Each structure stands twice: as C-alpha cells, then as structure tokens.
Image (tube, helix red, strand yellow):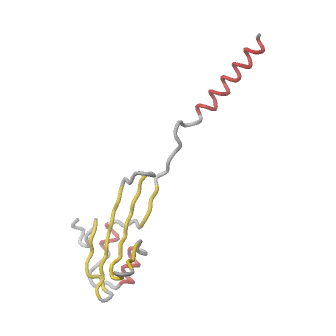
Amino acid sequence: MLKIFKRWVVLLIWCCFFSFGCKVSPYIQEVKQGNFIDEAMVSKLSLGMPQEQVRFILGEPLVIDPFQPDRWDYVYMSGKIGEVKREKSFTVFFKDGLLDKVDGDFAIGGSK
C-alpha cells in the first residue's frame, strides 16, 4: 500500500512539475514586413533629387509597378499572425528621373 502511495505522489509531483512549465497557448511572435521608414529618413529628401539618391536614403522600394516605373511604394506592416497592429505607407513619384512629389504617412517638410 505504501509503495503504491509513493508512486502516486511521485507521479503527481512529476505531472505538476512539467505542467507548470507549459503554456496553454503557444507564443506567437510579432512579424515585421516591408520597408521601415521614419521621419528622419524622409526629412533628408528634397524635391528634384535623382532616383539613385532616393534609393540610397529610403532603401529598395517594396513595390515598383512595371506599368508606372516612376512610382515607388514603401509599405511597412507589423503585428501578430492574423492581425496588423501598425501599417505605414509612403509613395514617391518621379518625373524625368527626379523626385516630383510624395504621398503617404510622411511629408517632406515633416508637416504630416
């Protein structure tokens, strides 16, 4: 009888030890995708800049439309799977290879 009781106690302690170390749900890491752009980067831009300088400051654009090669889209999203916490977008437009205008969450003068 005492031997069976000891086995149950050991089994109970073993189950408690391993069950407290496990979570009920798995950890879901936040996913960050796209081009991270902040106001410091955008403040370095000025109208009339060539495409190479814009690419150097902002990085490679996420989307270059083959039908509108003078438009570059920079998009940044973060959040857990199934939900997007933060989404920022920034679009630059070129005319004759020079920066013509910008659109999105930031403005060149920092007024947005």
**Direction from residue 27 to residue 67 in the image, left or right:** left
Residue lying furthest bottom: 96
**Which quarter of the picture shows residue 71?**
bottom left
Q: What number of labels is visible? A: 0
Q: Position of residue 40 (x, y in %)?
A: 33, 68
Q: Residue at x 35, y 71 (%)?
A: 41
**Which quarter of the picture shows residue 56?**
bottom left
Residue lying furthest left: 111
Q: Residue at x 40, y 51 (%)?
A: 83
Compared with 82, 35 (above or below) is below
Residue lying furthest front: 67
Q: Position of residue 66 (x, y in %)?
A: 39, 81
Question: Observer-nearest residue: 9 or 56?
Answer: 9
**Direction from residue 108 to residue 59 in the image, left or right:** right
Residue lying furthest top: 1
Q: Residue at x 68, y 27 (%)?
A: 14
Question: Observer-nearest residue: 94 or 45?
Answer: 94
Q: Residue at x 25, y 70 (%)?
A: 107
Q: Position of residue 57 (x, y in %)?
A: 38, 76
Compared with 5, 15 (above or below) is below
**Which quarter of the picture shows residue 69?**
bottom left
Quadrant where the C terminus sits is: bottom left
Compared with 39, 18 (above or below) is above
Compared with 43, 85 (above or below) is above
Q: Position of residue 51 (x, y in %)?
A: 36, 83
Quadrant where the N terminus sits is: top right
